[in-house]
Amino acid sequence: MRGYGGGRRGRARRVAGLVLAGIVLSGVLAAAAPVRVDRTASEPRTAGSRTNVVGGEPVPVDDYPWAVHLTTRNGVVFCAGALVAADRVVTAAHCLLGASADRVRVVVGRTDSGGAEGQSLPVDGLWVHPEFTTAVRGDDVGLLRLATPVDRATIAVAGPSDTDPYRPGTAAEVVGWGAEEEGGLPGGPLRRVVVTTLSAEDCARSHPEVDGDRMVCAEDAAGRAGFCQGDSGAPLVAEGLLVGLASFSAGCASEDPGVHTRLSHHRDTLEGVDDWSRAVAGTPGA
């Protein structure tokens, strides 16, 4: 996760979708009740002004105990997600294309992806939204089922009646283990950035393909911070609820807003999933 630079280099990559927040990896794609987060997204975590978190502010994972990262069996980070039940992790659908349960691990309780704290947990089921085709067409949401439930705090998913967290101008947080610069490799410490939600109309000026019913856009007010490679599925949290997942952007160095899956549109579907697969077809990272 890093700050956006001054140019619009991502514009050259708007064909076949924009820049997905995940990365392609060879072989993969490359019971506590849900609780609201007490702290608001706008509350600072360290002394200093907002400008001090440009590029992502390192934070301890215990402040975001439901935040997880996805790795290969060899420990390579490729996406992020959120623990929404003792045995359920929600992430971006495009993270799971071409994946199989025996080749994915969910890491909980680890601030630095290269550290040894926390647990690397096996997965025994995968699910991708049946209407998903590409991130820019929406429905970019999937689930992983942990082989064994974990005793760790979870986060509540916004539902259809939770409209306030999506109001334009609402402060929100994105947390993930993504790269710190475009073209870089994900991993390292957990970072967070503070962003502001936008209306679908304002977002459409940068992303005409945005569907306001299934997506929500957010940006740093100064255009300098947001998600990057390896942050696909990174939680977007507002008013204590999980409101979105990092899906796509015009590039890490773009001034354009990031686009997130709007989870209030999908919560009922997610709660009803009972058809699990061991593998997901598709082209990794598509």
Image (cartoon, rainbow, N blue to C red):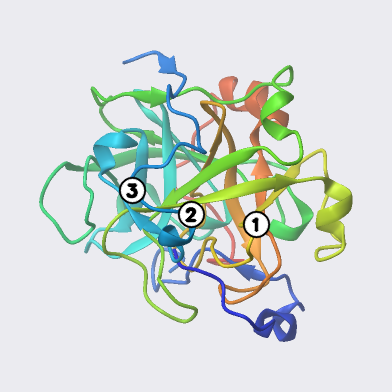
Q: Earlier in the sequence, mark 1 or mark 2?
A: 2
Which quadrant of the figure contains the C terminus? Answer: bottom right
Residue positioned 28% across, 65% down in the render: 76
Which quadrant of the figure contains the N terminus? Answer: bottom left
Q: CA distance from mark 2 to mark 3?
A: 9 Å
Disc 2 crowd rating (10 Å Cα; few below 14, some 14-19, many 20+) is some
Is residue 120 visible in this depiction of the protein? yes
Location of residue 164 with respect to 138 vertically, above or below: above
Q: CA distance from mark 1 to mark 3?
A: 19 Å
Location of residue 18 with respect to 149 vertically, above or below: below
Location of residue 86 with respect to 132 vertically, above or below: above
Q: Position of residue 223 (x, y in %)?
A: 63, 66
The single residue placed furthest to the left in the displayed view is: 116
Is residue 134 visible in this depiction of the protein? no
The mark closer to the camera, 1 or 3, is: 3
**Amino acid type assigned to the residue bearing label 1 in the image:** Ala
Q: Position of residue 153 (x, y in %)?
A: 32, 23
**Amino acid type assigned to the residue bearing label 2 in the image:** Arg
Location of residue 88 with respect to 159 vertically, above or below: below
Direction from residue 31 to residue 139 in the image, left or right? right
Residue 8 has which mark? none
Count of residue discs: 3
Residue identified by numbered label 3: 47
Residue identified by numbered label 2: 50
SS under mark 1: loop
Residue positioned 46% across, 67% down in the render: 2
Q: Position of residue 83 (x, y in %)?
A: 40, 32
SS under mark 2: helix
SS under mark 3: loop
Tell me whether the residue at label 1 lies in contact with that at label 2, contact meaning CB atoms closer than 8 angstroms.
yes
Residue identified by numbered label 1: 221
Q: CA distance from mark 1 to mark 2?
A: 10 Å
